[in-house]
Amino acid sequence: MATLEIKDLHVSVEGKEIIRGLSLEVNKGEVHALMGPNGSGKSTLSFALAGHPKYTVTRGEARFKGGDLLALPPDERARAGLFLAFQYPAAVPGVTVGNFLRTAVNSHRANGSAPRALTGKEAEAGKNGGNQISAREFLKVLKENMRILNLQDDFAFRYLNDGFSGGEKKRVEILQMAVLKPELAILDETDSGLDIDAMKTVAEGVNRLVGPEMGALVITHYQRLLNYIKPQKVHVMMEGRIVTSGGPELVHELEAKGYDWIRQKFGIAATATAAAS
Amino acid sequence: MTIAEMTQLVGLNADGFSELLARRSGEPAWMRQAREAAWELYKTMPMPTRRDEEWRRVDLRSIRLSEIAPFAARSSGALPVAVKERITAGPASAAMVVQHNSEDAYIEVDPEIRRQGVTVCGLDEAVRLHPDLVRKYFGVIRPAAHNKFTALHYAFQSGGTFIRVPAGVRVDKPIRSMVYLDADGAGCFPHTLILLEKGASLNYFEERIGLDDGRRQNLASGVAEIHMDDGAQIRFMSLQEYNRDTFNFSSEKTIGQKDARVAWLTAELGGRLNKGFIDCDLTGPGGRCELLGLYYINGRQQSDVVTLLTHKAPHTEGNILFKGVCDDAARSCFRGRIVVQKEASQTQSFLADHTMLLSDKARSDSVPTLEIEANDVICKHAATVGEISAEELFYLLSRGIPEPVARKMIVLGFFEEVLKGVPAASLQKLVRRHLQAKFDVHDHDATMPGLSESDMESD
């Protein structure tokens, strides 16, 4: 039983089919790279797996640790151990990084029960759930991880992604991953908009976590992130499905030849429009 | 028959007015005359209707004035436990003035500010102890004629707070004014009169609280008048939590002279209906006014606030920011108005209001107005009405936060921009806690009359 097992997945957005029969297995301890040109459906896959309501699964299945992932609402998927690092994380004004992340940690600990006890006075007192993380303990964990990611302490008290630079947003995504400790992380274009130093920091943050406790699906359309996060398996996605898979050598082949040779090899037209007609 | 029972027999009508005058027979003649003039005015002023622009969004038809007592005695000799708890829960204060129903109940003043010449007392006591000052300033900047309910206020006024800070004196710890209304079917007419001399500085925090098990209508009509001399500063913070049967009218006005600084924050959580007028005139150069407000209403609550910031002198600065959340079938209206008079060149003033609707039945209107008669002025406004952002919600859910908690975080987060403006950290916490409490109570409140189950899903 793979940690994440996707079989013949079809996903539509507003009536338009984007994912057309995708199958993939990722295990803890593994790093898979999912590469492909713009518009091939990579981000759609990540949103569908995270449970975004705009993305409708029309066929196929996705199992997480043996259970039906698609039957769960998004918050339960997260608590089951799935994490999506967003390409464009939403800004939530008025909600601090610290408060948000502590609520998330406590939600995981309470496993979704008695949500009212997760904030306010009872949670402050640690009365409910018994295993709620105290503010002090949480802040210690948070600061430790912020230091590793080169984030200033004041990020704990800044509003979530509100006015953050592109690089800060990505580092805060990795921060959340480090604190929430998922079993499987999907990193959606985490390298986009990062300079080389920021990318190294982010990659180190990811590498630190990948291991027996966590697997990762790294989505990117450039190879450069994969110089720092080494995948065991590389998948190339086009037209909503995986057209070929291979080892790390595939990354270099793509780097040298671009995507066109794959199109030619598998008989895929140059644009989606052409393929649709 | 006890006094409390007797007062229930008369309403806000001619009999009630006679009753009040009899009760107040010890008052100076000028005060009695002011009441009589206000009562005459009240009788001649028509009840506002939805045809009156400023009253278009509030429904006054269900008020039963003849069933509301003009005066309610304290229900017991001791301070109610709830009041004691509120005193302790709030910030440490330089003075505390508590009114229980229509009567002064408790006062405590730090001897240090007394030594500095600061005067703090109930308004009724000020009429006795400082008649010249009260007579000079009472009803001057917010006269009875402002609207029908201000006229009613001046006819029936009882209670309120009087504060005078002498030139150059700073009162940093807040002076607190609390009105606690646990009478059922009662009127409440507190008057706040604040005099700040040259360079004086005051932190003021008022709470208006109603016991939440009323059966009959209450009516509150409060007036605040704040006179600020050159260089005076005030941080004014108001938290309104009357019960769900209270029609709450308020009318507040500040006049700030040269270099006066006004930092205002009003938080409305309670009341069946809130109709508020908040005005500030900046009459001298260098004056500055920051006017913040927030409200969170649900069920069938209505809120309609009119703010008017008038720049009468050059080099003045203003900022109005209101944020509101309406759930269930609640309705709100915000009328922000900034006037920059001809003399007020090189003035900056901003007006913004943002409302979040949590249900299909909730409604909100924004009516911003800028009137600019001067040149060389920066004046802008912005208004939005929206719902909880689907992307923000999904983001929180994707981190494992259950939906009700995620919604609550977003809604409470929406208020933070305003809460940040609360002068003291302890007050900020207090208001935040009360917002949270209202949200949490609502989570469990499935007994809203006239609302279907589906209306309640949005919490």
Image: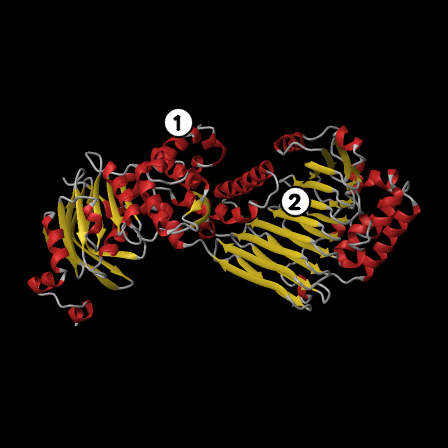
Tag of residue A130: 1
Residue A73 in view here: no
User: Quick one: SS at disc 2?
Assistant: strand
Circle 2 is placed at which residue position?
B238
- Horizontal placement of B396 versus A30: left or right? right
Badge 1 crowding class, 10 Å Cα cut-off, few under 14, some 14 to 19, many 20 or more, is: few
Residue A92 in view here: yes
Q: Measured from the top left, where is residue B232 in percent x and y? A: 73, 46
Q: CA distance from mark 1 to mark 2?
A: 37 Å
In the rendered image of this protein, does residue A268 appear above or below residue A113? below
Q: Measured from the top left, where is residue A156 in percent x and y? A: 43, 39
Badge 2 crowding class, 10 Å Cα cut-off, few under 14, some 14 to 19, many 20 or more, is: many
Asked whether the beta carbons under mark 1 and mark 2 sit within 8 Å of each other, the answer is: no
Q: Measured from the top left, where is residue B49 in percent x and y? A: 69, 63
Camera-side residue of B369 and B412: B369
Type of amino acid at the residue the image marks with label 2: Ser
Asked where in the image residue B83 lies, by quadrant, the reply is: top right
In the rendered image of this protein, does residue B78 appear above or below residue A5? above
**Given the image, what chain letter belongs to the residue carrying mark 2?**
B
Quarter the C terminus of chain A occupies: bottom left
Residue drawn at (75%, 38%), measured in percent from left and top? B169
Type of amino acid at the residue the image marks with label 1: Gly
